[in-house]
Image: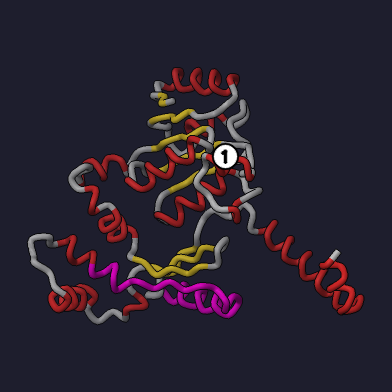
Amino acid sequence: MTTFAVLSEFGPSSRSIMINGLEALHRASRMDADTVYPQFFRLGQDQDRRALSDLLARDPSLTVCDAIEAQLTELVKSMDPSVKWDAATAGAAVSQHVGIMPLDEYGVWVYYLWSHRLVHMLDEKEFALVRTDRNRNKITRDEQAALATKRVGVVGLSVGQSVALCMTLERSFGEIRLADFDCLDLSNLNRIRSGVHSLGSNKTVAVAREIAEIDPFLKVTCFTQGITTANIDAFFGEGGRLDVLIEECDSVEMKILTRQKARELHVPVVM
């Protein structure tokens, strides 16, 4: 009642503008509903520099996060851990490493459409080196390289969400395939670490976005219809056979179906 009274004070034209504005917001949110892949800009390339300039002109209110100097400092330290680093020696090493390249051209700028954030970060090889540096030698460099070739399938994104994000933190896969037909409900937030801004999103989309925000270079494939008889072959084999299936779904039928396919293809199952 209070909202109606306030709106009425503005008159029908203002109320109409507000309603039209809300409709536009809903249209925009529907357009962005399934976006899970960020956009990359490498400013040493003219085409990417122009594309980023166009993006900034279209969306001047986006949030820019630029901590590239801190990332470079971590990088040079991780490349030579035998040195007793201080601010001066680290700064000199960063300058030498970057050379004459302008700092805004170093690495890559990553745009997350769903959160309107633009983040400046190291490019993939250096990013992975620094991000996993404190796993050493829990996971050795050779083991990390081997894990980067593995394909993991996760069916069921309630418990599966925690599994997928834990594997993301350790960078223990090259590709992850996520399958769940369900959307994130408020009652799911007792066991799924997510935010209220993701309510109503397909669970695979919500998890894929979280993965991209931790590590945008990891390959994520979403099966938003869950596993069906029509897509199970693609889930297990398209783009290369799965190396392991992590099954956390509720459906007994799907538990049986995925195990039958895993046995046929000699894919290990973790439940």
Badge 1 element:
strand
Instruction: Name the image quarter holding the N terminus.
Output: bottom right
In the image, is residue 244 above or below residue 101? above
Whether residue 15 sits left or right of residue 220 in the image: it is right
Q: Looking at numbered disc 1 in the image, what kind of residue is underneath it?
A: Phe
Range shown magenta: 45-73
Whether residue 266 sits left or right of residue 55 in the image: it is left
Q: Residue drawn at (49%, 63%), measured in percent from left and top?
A: 39
Q: Residue drawn at (63%, 45%), measured in percent from left and top?
A: 186
Find the residue positioned furthest to the right. Answer: 12
Which residue was labeled with disc 1? Answer: 223
Residue 48: say if magenta. Answer: yes
Q: Main secondary structure of the magenta part?
A: helix
Q: How many residues crowd mark 1 within 10 Å: few (<14), some (14–19), many (20+)? A: many
Image coordinates for residue 180, horizontal then vertical, percent: 58, 36
Q: Residue drawn at (40%, 37%), measured in percent from left and top?
A: 151
Q: Nearer the viewer, residue 128 or 241?
A: 128
Q: Residue drawn at (54%, 43%), measured in percent from left and top?
A: 222
Residue 63: say if magenta. Answer: yes
Q: Nearer the viewer, residue 116 or 85?
A: 85
Q: How many numbered callouts? A: 1
Instruction: Name the image quarter holding the C terminus.
Output: top left
Whether residue 249 sits left or right of residue 44 in the image: it is right
